[in-house]
Amino acid sequence: MSTPTNSPEDQERLIEALAGAWRPQDPRRIRFHPAFFDLDATGRAEAFERTAQLRQMEAALDPEGLSTTARAVILRIRGQNPAGFGS
Amino acid sequence: MTDVADLDRYLPAIAAGDARAFGAWMSEAEAPLRRSLRRFAAVVDTEAVLQEALLRTWQVAPRMTPDGRPDSLLRLAHTIARNLAIDETRRRRTVAVEPALMAEGIDEAERIEPRPPDPMLRRVIALCREKLPPRPGQALAARLGAGGRQPDAVLARALSMSHNAFLQNITRARKLLAACLRRNGVELEVP
């Protein structure tokens, strides 16, 4: 595995970016966030912890208790089958 | 009779195509599924894997036959997530360790146990959010509103922020919320 070297500021920015729920969409395969490839194992592990913390906060702030991960999945479901989504 | 703690209580509605029921199921299933991917965090994008696993769980739910044990859909989702993580690890050929070994040794109860949302957390975090400074509050609201639909660069532009400033404001919002929660006696769960 390559080990990218980032300044502390870049590392922090990349971790925060990876902790977001947006991911590139490709119906043929799973696409990783671009920031993933610019982080080393330590940065990726930190992003995992931060993501878990953020999702708890997001779910607690959401009227339906959904994190941005769950919202992103529902958007994909809606995109696949608009008529099948409970309104 | 289905136990109220058993997430399979949502299964009939999910199988009938009710995405709101699936949302309610995800609100309790997401955290344990994410925890189960922790060992893969250094080698695969666990958020991307988790979203794909949840989508596939929705797709197969109508054809699923419960096995009589609690949380059958959660256990299926766990298997899907684990297999996707192993496939992605193999596909990218980034580690010498056999990926299946990375998934072993995870305590079964820990990795699939659902936990209901904490009402105290919901109450306190709403008060904490009101105290956020404007820019961190706006950045957080943009992320919440987008629900993963748009990249941060697009959200930043809409707020007339640079991408870097947007991410710094997300960091500030997260840290301020966590500190406010701690001051009010609420600790977030450790993943």
Image (cartoon, coloured by chain):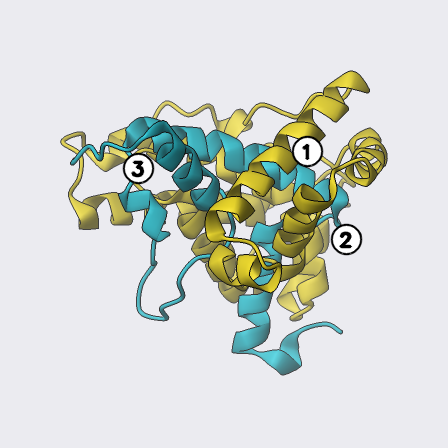
Where is mark 3, residue-wise? A39
Marks 3 and 1, how far apart at CA: 31 Å
Task: Kindly report which numbered mark, 3 or 1, lies closer to the viewer in this rendering.
Answer: 3
Label 3: state its secondary structure: loop
Q: Which color is chain A depicted in?
A: cyan
Few, some or many C-alpha atoms within 10 Å of disc 3 (few <14, some 14-19, many ≥20)? Answer: many
Q: Which chain carries label 3?
A: A
Q: How far apart are labels 1 and 2 at the CA level?
A: 16 Å
The quadrant of the picture occupied by the N terminus of chain A is top left
Instruction: Answer with mark 3 or mark 2, whichever residue precedes in sequence.
Output: 3
Q: Where is residue B25 in the image (x, y as percent from the top left)?
A: 67, 51
Q: Mark 2 lies on which chain?
A: A
Q: Chain B is drawn in which colour?
A: yellow
Is residue A37 toward the left or the right of residue A52 in the image? left
Q: Is mark 1 on a helix, strand or loop?
A: loop
Q: Can I make out residue B11 in this image? A: no
Q: Are marks 3 and 2 in contact (CB under 8 Å)?
A: no
Seen at 78% across and 31% down, the residue is B121
Label 2 sits on residue: A64
> Disc 1 sits on a residue from what chain?
B
Instruction: Please tell me if label 1 and label 2 are on a single chain.
Output: no
Q: Nearer the viewer, residue B66 or B29?
A: B29
Give the distance between the C-alpha atoms of the residues marked 3 and 2, in whole angstroms.
Answer: 33 Å
Q: Are marks 3 and 1 on the same chain?
A: no
In the rendered image, the vertical position of residue B112 relative to residue B9, given as above or below:
above
Q: Nearer the viewer, mark 3 or mark 2?
A: 3
Residue A31 x/y as whole percent? 34, 58
In the image shown, does B56 or B139 lie closer to the viewer?
A: B139
Q: What residue is rendered at 48% in x and 28% in y? A: B108
Q: Nearer the viewer, residue B130 or B38?
A: B130
